Image (cartoon, grey):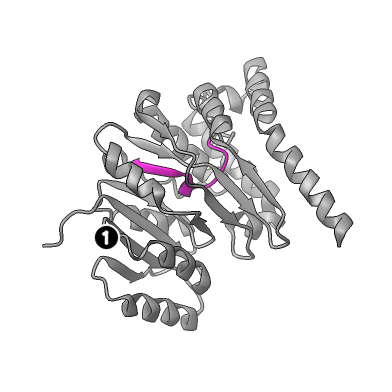
Amino acid sequence: MMENKLLSVLIPSFNSYQGVVTIVELLKTRKEIEIIVSDDSTDIEISHLIKSYLSKIGRSDIVYYKHKSTGNAVDNWNFLLSKVKGKFFVLAHHDETFTNTLFIDTIEKYQDSIELMILPLKVQHANGVYRSVKSLAQSLMIKLLRKSGLTLNFIGGPTALLIVKSSHINFFNRNLVFYVDIEWYRRLFLDIPIEVVMFYSETSVISLITDFSITKNILPSMGKVVASDIAILKKDYPHNVLLTKSFTGFILRLIHKLILAPSFLLFYFRKIKYLLTK
């Protein structure tokens, strides 16, 4: 029987061979981890490429599944969560990777004293312009907004920012689309005391803006998607201050914007600089 690993790295893939290669190449020499790829690709050739690449690595703890697509990406994420065997897990999409693997060493060192590690974010655009969310901003948002943040991304980015102890596995709500991550974050943080959360700044998550990102794909119908999600959230959380026209909700939204303002100001400065030097 294969021993349980320190960390399960979960990669839901969708039509992105290079995305899978990028993250696996970084992590494949780390023996403390298992890597599980669940492939929802509609392009059969890409699926064959991913499966072939992983098999050539020759590790029994790097596993490929061809997931039968339901048309709902969340089903693939939940399938991966059902396969976790490691003491911790991270869900990293095919358009995300890490700047280094130092976070794994730190998890190993503090595995008995932390329940959750949070990594900072770098959102990378194709033209090289990027936006960063630092650990300090994340710490402020989480401390102030985690209990109410159903419609505010209070960790500042995607699921790959969170290294979670596996005893806290929660499945995503497949009925949500735009707010699916945030609603999952809120349930997660209600279960984990802030005292056992580590903000680790030596490794960042790089999130690439690609044609296959979920947010980009729903842009044409964003209004309807958000309205549908809000209706579901109001039913499940009827007293949440962010779902009502309350003064408290207004203040929380303002706090969120103020904390993230430096991140966006620097991003727009870099964007203007890029446009001027073209």
Of residues 73 and 153, the one drawn nearer to the viewer in this rendering:
153
Which class describes the residues within 10 Å of circle 1: few (<14), some (14-19), or many (20+)? few
The percent position of residue 158, horizontal first and vertical second, equals 52, 47
Q: Is residue 15 visible to us here?
A: no
The percent position of residue 173, horizontal first and vertical second, equals 44, 45
Q: Which residues are magenta?
A: 155-164
Residue 251 vs 126, above or below: the answer is above
Q: Quadrant of the N terminus?
A: bottom left
Of residues 128 and 90, the one drawn nearer to the viewer in this rendering:
128
The residue at 32%/78% (across/down) is: 55
Q: Residue furthest right?
A: 276
Q: Is residue 114 visible to us here?
A: yes
Q: Which residue is mark 1?
A: 31
User: Any magenta on residue 268?
Assistant: no
The residue at 25%/46% (across/down) is: 87
The residue at 39%/70% (across/down) is: 68
User: Any magenta on residue 159?
Assistant: yes
On screen, residue 217 versus residue 10, left or right, reads right
Q: How many marks?
A: 1
The residue at 68%/57% (across/down) is: 125
The amino acid beneath tag 1 is Lys
The percent position of residue 191, horizontal first and vertical second, equals 35, 29
